[in-house]
Image (spheres, rainbow, N blue to C red):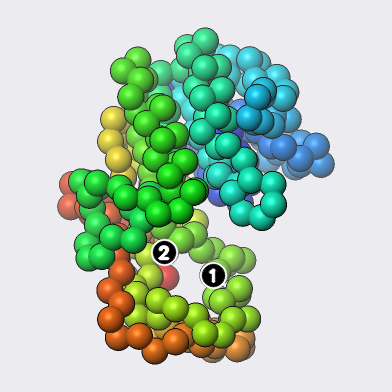
Amino acid sequence: MSNTIAIIGCGWLGLPLAKEFIKENFTIKGSTTSPEKINLLKKEGIEPYLIKLNEGEIEGSIHEFLKNVDTIIINVPPRLRGVSKENYVSKMHLLHSEIKRTTIKNVVFISSTSVYGDIDGEVTEKTIPEPATESGKQLIVSENIFKNDSDLKVSIIRFGGLVSEDRHPVTMLSKKDNLSNGNMPINLIHRNDCTLIIKSVIKNCWWDTIINGVYPYHPKKQDYYKKEAIKRNLKAPKYEPNSSEKGKIIVSEFLINHKKFKFLTSIRN
């Protein structure tokens, strides 16, 4: 196992992840698209690089960033909301081509449970994805760019909704009325557990696998978010009554049943 890891995307998840690896004496190369964040990464002991993935080119010193690295963590979500929608798949093809020119053998690709689409019932890693959104569709194609490369050891981590002390879906939901899907279950995970899962994959060599990363707690959205809003002194979101909804429960089967993984941070009310 190499002691140098490249994290492409040192933001909300990537930065605390880098700090965790540094505590354990890993050398971390980290990328950002913001020039003002370069000094912040330096102060945290990260070797910083200003890199931007575009559809037609990669801006920045991508060759230096990937040099002498054995493992890369790809933590770049699709940006498909709003007016300026991108071709995420093109960006991942470019990154894959650059990786192929290096000594990198291990890839952790951070994906999303959105690839499963609108499936009802329990969903495990063996469930065949049926993405319904453009983001989910581009993610599943991008996963396969790396997974189908037999020269690489690739682990795909599909995280559920991401939460932390400073980030929670209820903040936005509290401003809305007439929401649908109130009877559907939540599928969330705390950032602390995201970092622990990624660290476990690399340190324990959990390669060539797909991993669902969701905390095993799935109350109805309308019940959960109402309690979360009350805790934060926010207006509770209002859901339309609909008893026919089912929704999906994402089961972290690989972690819980195969690796006896213990989640660090509860998301229970």
**Could you give the CA–CA distance between mark 2 and mark 1, rounded to whole angstroms?**
10 Å
The amino acid beneath tag 1 is Pro
Q: Position of residue 60 (x, y in %)?
A: 72, 23
Q: Is residue 194 visible?
A: no
Res 247 → quadrant: bottom left
**Taking 63 as reference, is 157 above or below it?**
below
Q: Position of residue 21 (x, y in %)?
A: 51, 38
Front residue of this view, candidates 225 and 247: 247
Tell me the quadrant of the picture where the C terminus can be found. bottom left
Q: Which residue is mark 1?
A: 169
Q: Is residue 165 left or right of residue 84?
A: left
Total numbered labels: 2
Q: Which residue is mark 2?
A: 188
At x 62%, y 40%, the residue is 86
Mark 2 is surrounded, within 10 Å at the Cα level, by few (under 14), some (14 to 19) or many (20 or more) other residues, namely many
Front residue of this view, candidates 32 and 117: 117
**Taking 8 as reference, is 231 above or below it?**
below
At x 72%, y 25%, the residue is 59
**Taking 178 as reference, is 93 above or below it?**
above
Q: Is residue 74 left or right of residue 235?
A: left
Residue contact at pointers 2 and 1, CB within 8 angstroms:
yes
Q: Secondary structure at mark 2?
A: strand
Q: Position of residue 239 (x, y in %)?
A: 46, 85
Name which of mark 2 and mark 1 comes first in the sequence.
1
Q: Is residue 153 left or right of residue 230?
A: left
Q: Secondary structure at mark 1?
A: loop
The amino acid beneath tag 2 is Leu
**Taking 51 as reference, is 122 above or below it?**
below
Q: Position of residue 251 (x, y in %)?
A: 26, 58
Tell me the quadrant of the picture where the N terminus can be found. top left
